[in-house]
Every structure is written in structure tokens, then in C-alpha cells.
Image: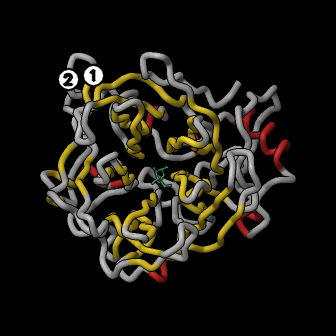
Amino acid sequence: MKIRSSSKFNYSFALAILVLNSCNAPADKESKDSTAAVAPAATVAETPVSQPVVSHIYTADPSAHIFNGRIYIYPSHDTVTGAPENDNGDHFDMNDYRILSMDSIDGAVTDHGVALKLSDIPWAGKQLWAPDAAFANNTYYFYFPAKDKKGIFKIGVATSRSPQGPFKAEAKPIDGTYSIDPCVFKDDDGSFYLYFGGIWGGQLQRWNNNKYDSSGKLKQAEETAILPRMAKLKPDMKSLAEPVKEIKLVDEQGNLFKEKDNDKRFFEGPFVHKFNGKYYFSYSTGDTHNICYAIGESPNGPFTYKGILLKPVKGWTNHHSIVEKDGKWYLFYHDVQLSGKTHLRNIKVTELEYNPDGTIKTINPYK
Ligand code: FUB
């Protein structure tokens, strides 16, 4: 089984990029790590279509929102802790969150500092993975996955009066949640929905009918692939209004994908947005590294597969969000341009375009 390591990494690309960016590497202790990929030979590098949004820290899994006319980015904050690199994703050992903002896509970026840290989350044990945020009730809500003290991923919520934080975490994770990668979508009627899930290190394979089984296995090639999950949120934004349900992600014939369809089936990183009255469910295919998307008529699905939104990036993980600003649509994503290392990522942004029929033009992150 291919591991979540830099094994997919293109080493000639790594050398070219490391040389190009040696002056830009994050200035804190993370840049002192000397185990970056070593290239056997230099060749002409592929050119990224965009540059890192910031280079003073490592950031990943960007969830972008427009609050009060300003772009706020809620990313993971990648860091070096020496945790081992494995299929479980132990090397993604993040212990705080930082929030970034800018007034336009090309504008100066403000780093608002530490918004929430592991030691201030009463229930969490380790690994602060991909977060999201929402605004309701005159409050900003920050949703985040973390392993609890028993090593089981749950989803927590923290609140602030400001989109930049700092956020105060609730004492317990959101009842009924599990796994990773929360995405909160607000529909036009004011309802909020929580989407989540991730297989492999994200532990979704351990949850069947919302019951935990520590020996839960990944599916075999001919079995139906594991499905992402969702639930409507209560108006308090801190609890689920209904039991968690599976999201039907189907092909054009209405069939669920099998595990062997791993270039299309859900792996992690769900994201939902609305365009021209349709609901777009996009996600990472994980071990095949695509961001794909599917379209539905309801926030509950089913969602019908439409294609690849973002081709694989350098690094193992691929994770995104989509936001509209001043009449244009943007894709936030990450790669490993600054470090060449799979767990030290940098967020990026590029324009996203729709075709007249509502499908999305596939983005290749390199020219
Ligand atoms: O950043 C840790 C994990 O890597 C995220 O939760 C996944 O989506 C992947 O990007």
C-alpha cells in the first residue's frame, strides 16, 4: 500500500523548487529540519500556476471565507515534531491553528497569530487537522478535528466574537461527530450543514451506522466505497439536529463507486458550495490525489460525479476550498513547494472557472 509519504514526490521538481525557494522557507524552527528530499539530478521544473500565500510558516488545508468583505483563511498549521511518517498520518502532528486574512486575492496577508492551541482544548489529545469556520448568532464558529485522549478522531467547535479569533473551545467534541475534515455549508434559507470524513488515518472505516469499531477495515476493491458523512446543525451551531447520515456519491448511472474506483471515490476533505442553485460536493480521492466534484439538487445529496476539479499537487495530500470574491470564483489549495516534504505544506490560491453548463474547468496546478 502506498503510504502518505513523499514517495509520490517528483524529486527533480523538488530540487528545482527547493533552489528557487531557499530564500523563502519559513524562518522559524521548522526550516531547520534538514531531511528535505534530495534530488538525484536537476531537470527543468514544472511551473506552478500560483505561489504560496505565505512563506513564514507552513500552512495546509485552507478553508477560505468572506467575512465583512475580507478574505479569511482557516488553514492547518503544519509543523515539525519528529512524529513518524506512516499511512496513519502520524506525521501530520499539528498543535495549533493560525488564521490569515487579506482584503483581496492579491492583497497583503495578515497573520493573526495563534487562534487556538491544543493545550487549550480540554478534550483533545493530538493532531489538529483541517478546520473550517462559519458565522451565525453574531458569533464566529471554528470547527476542527482532533484525536481525543483515546486516539479517536472527533470534531470540536470553538467560538469567538471575531473572525480572526482567538477561539475558545467547547469542553467536549460535538456529540455524534467522528473522523476528520469538517466543512460547514450555509444554505440560502439560513440552515447550516456539517460535512465530514476521511478514510485511512482519518478513521472513517472504523464507523459503521455511527458506531465505533476499532477493528473497522478499509473496503476491498470490489466492495462499495466508504461514503462521506453529514448532518444538519442545530441553530446553536454546536450540536447536530439529526443523526449523522451517509452522503450518496454516485456515477452518471446512479451507482455508488466501488473501492477500486479510487480515482473517483471519496477519501477525505469534503467541501460543499452552491452555484446557480446547484449543490457542489467536492473532495479528495486521497491515494490517487485528485480533487473531484459532484453535483446535486439538495444539500443532502445524492451528488452525481462530474469530474476532476484539481489535478494532483506536489506532495501526498490534496485539500481545497472554493470561495466567491467580487464576482470571481477562487480555489484555495496547497502543495509542498516551499519544503518538498509531504507534511510541511503551503497554501495557494488560483481562479476557478465554470463552463456554461455548470461544470468546472479542470485546474492543472503546474504548467
Ligand atoms: O492536514 C492533515 C490532513 O491531511 C487533513 O485533515 C487531510 O485533509 C489532509 O490534507
In the picture, which quadrant includes the N terminus?
top left
- Amino acid of disc 2: Asn
Does the residue at mark 2 contact the one at mark 1 (Cβ under 8 Å)? yes
Mark 2: few/some/many CA within 10 Å (<14, 14-19, 20+): few
Whether residue 146 sits left or right of residue 220 in the image: it is: right
Q: Position of residue 298 (x, y in %)?
A: 25, 37
Whether residue 24 sits left or right of residue 71 in the image: it is: right
> Closer to the camera, 317 or 328?
328
State the colouring used for the structure image: secondary structure
On residue 255, the disc is 2
- Amino acid of disc 1: Asp
On residue 251, the disc is 1
Whether residue 144 sits left or right of residue 82 in the image: it is: left
Quadrant of res 178: bottom left
Q: Residue at x 38, y 83 (%)?
A: 122
Q: Residue at x 68, y 45 (%)?
A: 105
Q: Residue at x 21, y 56 (%)?
A: 215
Q: Position of residue 351 (x, y in %)?
A: 62, 33
* Mark 2–mark 1 distance (CA, rounded to whole Å): 5 Å
Q: Position of residue 108 (x, y in %)?
A: 76, 55
> Closer to the camera, 360 or 219?
360
Q: Label 2's element?
A: loop
> Closer to the camera, 220 or 67?
67
